Amino acid sequence: MKRQPQYAACVPRKDPVTVDTISRRHVLLGSGVLAGAAVAGVLPQFGPAAQLAHAAGATTHALKLGDFEITIVSDGHLVTPTRLEAPDVPEAERKAALTAAGQTAEMAQRPTNVTVIKTGEELIVVDAGSGPNFMPTAGKLTANLEAAGFDIEKVTKVIFTHGHPDHLWGALDDFEEGLRFPNATYMMAEGEWDYWMSENAEKGLPADRVTFVAAARRNIAGIEKKAQRFKTGQDIIPGLRAFDTPGHTQGHVSFELAGGGDSLVILGDALLHPIISFQHPEWRVGADHVVDQAVETRKKLLDRLAADKPRIIGFHLPFPGLGRVEKKDNGYIYVAAG
Ligand SMILES: [Zn+2]
């Protein structure tokens, strides 16, 4: 069966269990080789620079925040139809925004940037990536972590921004028989956990996303024994806490890390696109579950991020997804940063 690239947070592959394990191993191996050759510290931006960086195979980017050592590790990328970015917006306006992001074709590559936080004995992974069953271009996290010198057995916590496939389905191993990070505690916000487990989780979702619910529950069941639900506003570890950024999903959270007098906000999918989310936060986005709430969240977040000026990491912003929000004219822009 021919695999069609499909929409990131909308449509699962039609044959989620029919994975060619042998060719997948090949892909993993290949990606490890690429990662080994990668030059950490490359600072790609969106547009042609991002494509160059992609061609160079950069899969990790390191930075420091006080005592926290942070590494952004690629899980590969998704391939998604650009028309679904903001389906209600007149085509000419949408195309202008996409062109500004270097996305001129019908399909676009979307990076998937996983944040790894190391401090003392803690090794924390923020979101688990896609695993092998979502899109063939994603699910490279294990290989890229290992290529960057991480031992997945030493991961102490996996913390989730939300339960979409590209963030949750990598929680279990490639055969969905065990945990990908066998010694980790898996931590999800109470609101997000309750949403996916609620009787009404499918209500209001487009038909092409209904299958996400069963898959999320399967993954949640798989991690349950090692899972911890947390409340936003509480410390995960000293210096790291979650805050509510609902709308993309009902219980979506972002994480704030404070250290050395500086701070960093790990956004998950609260700000998805380098042009649209920043310059047109009011546009209704196809991937959001509670569309109007997501608009409100973006406006509040941008206001705060432009005022406080922390560094930000966006899961789908051009690799490594690290930058800041700045005010420009009457709106905001994303500025890639080191
Ligand atoms: Zn996502």
Image: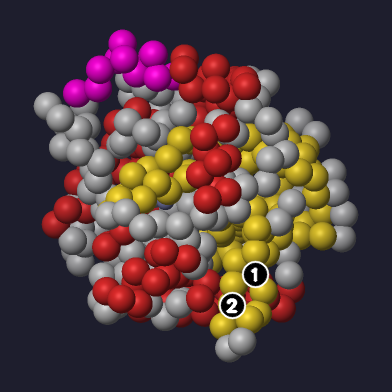
Taking the magenta stretch, the answer to whether it contains residue 210 is: no
Image quadrant containing the N terminus: top left
Residue under label 1: 325
Label 2 residue SS: strand
The residue that appears at 72% across and 39% down in the rendered structure is 41
The residue that appears at 55% across and 41% down in the rendered structure is 52
Tell me if 35 is positioned left or right of 292 in this view.
Answer: right
Counting labels gives 2
Taking 220 as reference, is 297 above or below it?
Answer: below
Tell me if 80 is positioned left or right of 154 in this view.
Answer: left
Q: Amino acid at mark 1?
A: Val
The answer to which quarter of the image holds residue 132 is top left
Region in magenta? 18-28
The answer to whether residue 196 is visible is: no
Q: Amino acid at mark 2?
A: Tyr
Q: Position of residue 176 (x, y in %)?
A: 33, 24
Query: Tag on residue 332?
Result: 2
Question: Magenta part mainly helix, strand or loop?
Answer: helix
The answer to whether residue 75 is visible is: yes
